[in-house]
Image (spheres, coloured by chain):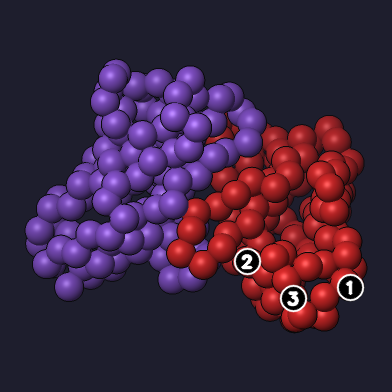
Chain colours: A red, B purple
């Protein structure tokens, strides 16, 4: 059974800092991994999707890496801003079957002005 | 539309009553998914559709939950005889293929 763990559960940093969020998964047989952002009372916004054959994806100040063999992914946020404050979730899709995501518990990020 | 629309935003039911939630996926998206978020950040997959066909329903408590995606109608998730533990936020998502998922803003179901 696939299990996804995110560390830390919560993180608070000053504005402008670079930071890394971690995600680990137990079964390396994945189809892809997605990072999402959830704002309070809102749905999820997909930030980055990494296919199992890829090592990383970048979008603006965000960079996500994937090491399938070790079961790890990181989300790097450069030059953090207060607007980055949200809960970040990673989710993996198993290699077979429908697009059925297994989510981590999330990291609640607070950027202090 | 360009966003996944879920209605209602909030739904309150007494234990044992029926609850019905609706989702309009993004136009042109073939796949629709329902997820349940119980307590903070615990997402549970319920069911997925490819067009109007059930694709994967392994997460559905079948004795009380049912879902449909019919042509030219919003998709629906229905809970017969709700229980206290059904209280959660129910998210619908859609995708074009096995690509990025686009989530709606959810329906908060409170069972009293």
Near mark 3 (Cα within 10 A), the count class, few <14, some 14-19 or many ≥20, is: some
Question: In this view of the protein, which residue sits in the foreground, A65 or B1?
Answer: B1
Q: Which residue is mark 3?
A: A111
2 vs 3, front mark: 3
- The percent position of residue B3, horizontal first and vertical second, equals 48, 37
- Residue at 54% x, 31% y is B95
The residues bearing labels 2 and 1 have C-alpha atoms spaced at a distance of 17 Å
Q: Mark 1 belongs to which subunit?
A: A
- The percent position of residue A47, horizontal first and vertical second, equals 70, 47
The residues bearing labels 3 and 1 have C-alpha atoms spaced at a distance of 9 Å
Number of dots carrying numbers = 3
- Mark yes or no: residue B62 visible: no
Q: Mark 2 belongs to which subunit?
A: A
**Residue farthest front in this picture:** A113
Q: Which residue is mark 2?
A: A87
Q: Secondary structure at mark 2?
A: strand
- Residue at 85% x, 36% y is A54
Marks 2 and 1, the one that precedes in the sequence = 1
- Residue at 77% x, 80% y is A113
Question: In this view of the protein, which residue sits in the foreground, B57 or A44?
Answer: A44
Q: Is residue A100 left or right of residue B56?
A: right
The residues bearing labels 2 and 3 have C-alpha atoms spaced at a distance of 11 Å
- In the picture shown, does residue B68 fall above or below A49? above
Contact? badges 2 and 3 (CB < 8 Å): no
Q: Secondary structure at mark 1?
A: loop
Q: Which residue is mark 1?
A: A17
């Amino acid at each position: 059974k696939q299990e996804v763990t995110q560390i830390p559960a919560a993180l608070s940093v000053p504005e402008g800092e670079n930071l890394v969020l971690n995600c680990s998964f137990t079964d390396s047989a994945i189809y892809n991994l997605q990072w999402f952002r959830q704002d309070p009372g809102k749905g999820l916004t997909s930030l980055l999707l990494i296919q199992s054959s890829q090592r990383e994806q970048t979008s603006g100040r965000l960079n996500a890496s994937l090491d399938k063999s070790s079961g790890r992914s990181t989300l790097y946020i450069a030059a953090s801003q207060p607007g980055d404050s949200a809960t970040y979730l990673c989710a993996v899709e198993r290699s077979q079957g429908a697009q059925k995501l297994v989510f981590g518990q999330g990291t609640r990020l607070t950027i202090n002005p | 539309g360009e966003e996944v629309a879920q209605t209602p935003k909030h739904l309150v039911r007494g234990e044992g009553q029926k609850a019905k939630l609706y989702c309009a996926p993004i136009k042109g998206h073939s796949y629709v998914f329902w997820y349940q978020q119980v307590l903070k950040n615990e997402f549970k997959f319920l069911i997925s559709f490819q067009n109007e066909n059930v694709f994967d329903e392994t997460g559905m408590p079948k004795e009380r939950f049912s879902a449909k995606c019919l042509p030219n109608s919003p998709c629906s998730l229905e809970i017969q005889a709700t229980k206290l533990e059904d209280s959660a936020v129910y998210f619908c998502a859609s995708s074009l293929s096995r690509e990025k998922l686009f989530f709606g803003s959810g329906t908060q179901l409170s069972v009293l």
